[in-house]
Image (cartoon, rainbow, N blue to C red):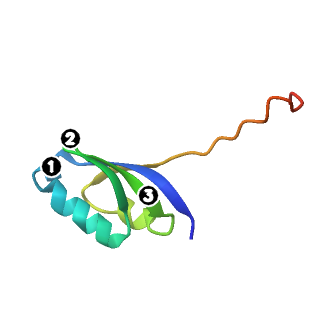
Amino acid sequence: MHIKNVVITLSHDCLDRINAVADSMSKEGLRITHLYEYGVITGTVDEMIIKTLREREEVISLTEEKQATIAPPDSEIQ
């Protein structure tokens, strides 16, 4: 199980039922951090569920947070 942070943008057509859409996504495994009335949801989800969420008709885009690492200050320059 690998948990990813995600940002989901919903279609304008579903904004009138955004709470129902969010509840449905929660039941699929999305742990919602923020739900914005203009159609954006942030949260965490197991990477196995991401494809299922992306394929929902209400979802315009689902972006996974990218991980970046920075070398310690005393390490050699690469």
Q: Residues within 10 Å of mark 2 (few under 14, many from 20)?
A: few
Considering only order in the chain, which callout, 1 or 2, is on the residue closer to the N terminus? 1
Instruction: Say whether residue 64 is left or right of residue 14.
Output: right
On residue 15, which mark appears? Answer: 1
Considering only order in the chain, which callout, 2 or 3, is on the residue closer to the N terminus? 2
Q: Quadrant of residue 21?
A: bottom left
Point out the residue furthest to the right here: 76
Judged from the image, the secondary structure of the residue bearing numbered disc 2 is loop
On residue 39, which mark appears? Answer: none
Considering only order in the chain, which callout, 3 or 1, is on the residue closer to the N terminus? 1
Instruction: Say whether residue 62 is left or right of residue 71.
Output: left
Q: Are marks 1 and 3 in contact (CB under 8 Å)?
A: no
Q: What's the residue type where badge 3 is placed? A: Thr
Identify the residue under disc 3.
44
Pick the residue in front: 61 or 43. 43
Q: Is residue 52 above or below residue 17?
A: below
Q: How far is disc 1 from disc 3 in space, using C-alphas?
A: 21 Å
Q: Residue 24 location, x and y as percent?
A: 25, 68
Pick the residue in front: 44 or 63. 44
The quadrant of the rendering that contains the C terminus is top right
Please tell me which residue is depicted at 38% across the width and 59% down the height of the picture: 54
Q: What's the residue type where badge 2 is placed? A: Tyr
